Amino acid sequence: MIPAPSSANSYDVVILGGGPAGTATALALKRRDPSCRVALVERSDYSSLRVGESLPPPAQALLRKLGVWETFLQRSPLESAGTRAAWGSPEMHENEFIFSPFGRGWHLDRRDFDSMLAREAERAGVSVFRRTQAHLIDQSAPWNIHLEGGDDASASCTITARFIVDATGRRSTFARSQGARPLVFDHLVGVVVFLKFAPEDRQLDTYTSVEACEHGWWYTAVLPCGDMAAIFMTDAALLGSMPWRTLDDWRTLTAMGPQTSKRIAKGQPLAKPSLHLAESRRLESCVGNDWLAVGDAACTLDPLSSQGVMKGLQSGIDASLAILSHLKGGSETLAAYDQQIAENYSRYLDGRAAYYGLEQRWPNSSFWKSRHEVVTLHPNEHLFAVSADAVSTPLKLSTRLSASELTVLAQACIQPRPAHQVLADFKTRSTRPCSDREVLLAMQALLAGGILSRN
């Protein structure tokens, strides 16, 4: 059991961010050790629009583990029949959830879902601060955190924490303030429009649909209220050359996805298109001195995986084990948590490359070429650095290696050497295990970026 903090404003764990990962961490901590004092700080009151998402059938086990399954069912979530994809061919192919041992999936109203988890955390004994901004006062544990309560200045106070959880989403605000650096693997963005349908035109089809096109792919999903989310996914650089900011421009983009265009034809947009970041990225390290990151703050997944919410729930459960062990004196638990995230993410990147590799209809499209991850470099091909200056500072390219690792790899080529020798030398010097494939792909990125050349 963890010794209780000495004052009402002292906590064992303070969680910054009240999305699925943050609330799952809070719930899991209280389920495992009710004596653990936990506070959760959320900037919003859960009333603003959040992009909806489908929850796959296996999420049921996680909701049961968190003790919120029955409450979730009481919210009458919209069941999802499965997924449908036009990927690798123009025809739609179905993957029905009826064949899943867990039953069907669900379409989420993220505002309602996230708010439900926060209320359940409160019921479990978590102190939940909504509409509250957190400002770190010092840089070491016990952490002193000043809270400012929205429009009500009287709600401001200072709390202390033995441990901090960064659940701030893609911003990774706290982790980055502690020096954590992100590894970015692509620059995917989504252009989102929500559509409303007349009662006679509402979609009875509850499949989540994905349709590939030359410069990206389309995603459409029905929301529990009967509206629909339609999202065009592409690279930020490609979007910069396309008109998309007006509804007329956005409608023009839908012509790239004929199946999508047909599905949304009778929908009336509720607002102008909005831009959302969707890149795959993870922190080089997700832990530090008395802190760790969870959910999207630790790593983000391509929306194609439909695993974002489920990954957040699972990472909160995993984090709770590491945190409680750490608070009780475990010396290696944070490092093990960090390693687990890195290994899981490597497997995710392999799966992502394999799935994108199934789409070969546009071989000259920069969007698809950048995701196919095909190793073309011959092991006997000689590589050399274009100049010493080019490899003297950390390099920033979208590869599986960090900026510092890329620099080491490029510096190994100051003198012309065959690729297999560079590979062996780098793996000997690397402080973490790297596969041959990810190092070879990094060499190809250095060649494409003009850092290395070949003879």
Image: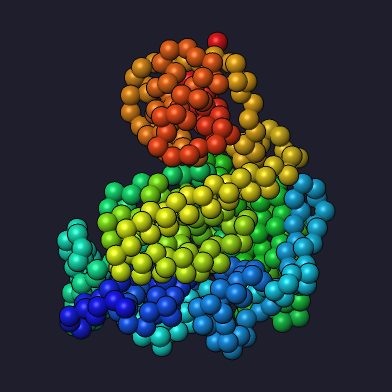
Nearer the observer, 325 or 437: 325
Q: Within the image, what quadrant is residue 239 found in?
A: top right
Q: Position of residue 418 (x, y in %)?
A: 54, 16
State which quarter of the image contains the N terminus.
bottom left
Nearer the observer, 53 or 238: 53
State which quarter of the image contains the C terminus.
top right
Q: Position of residue 158 (x, y in %)?
A: 18, 74
Describe residue 215's horizontal placement relative to residue 13 as left or right.
Answer: right
Describe residue 4's horizontal placement relative to residue 66 as left or right.
Answer: left
Q: Position of residue 356 (x, y in %)?
A: 67, 45
Q: How many marks?
A: 0
Q: In the figure, 313 relative to 369: above or below?
A: below
Q: In the figure, 412 relative to 291: above or below?
A: above
The answer to whether residue 430 is seen in the rendering is yes
Describe residue 270's horizontal placement relative to residue 204 as left or right.
Answer: left
The residue depicted at 61 percent of the width and 23 percent of the height is 377
The residue depicted at 50 percent of the width and 78 percent of the height is 66
The residue depicted at 75 percent of the width and 50 percent of the height is 87
Q: Position of residue 419 (x, y in %)?
A: 54, 20
Nearer the observer, 237 or 94: 94
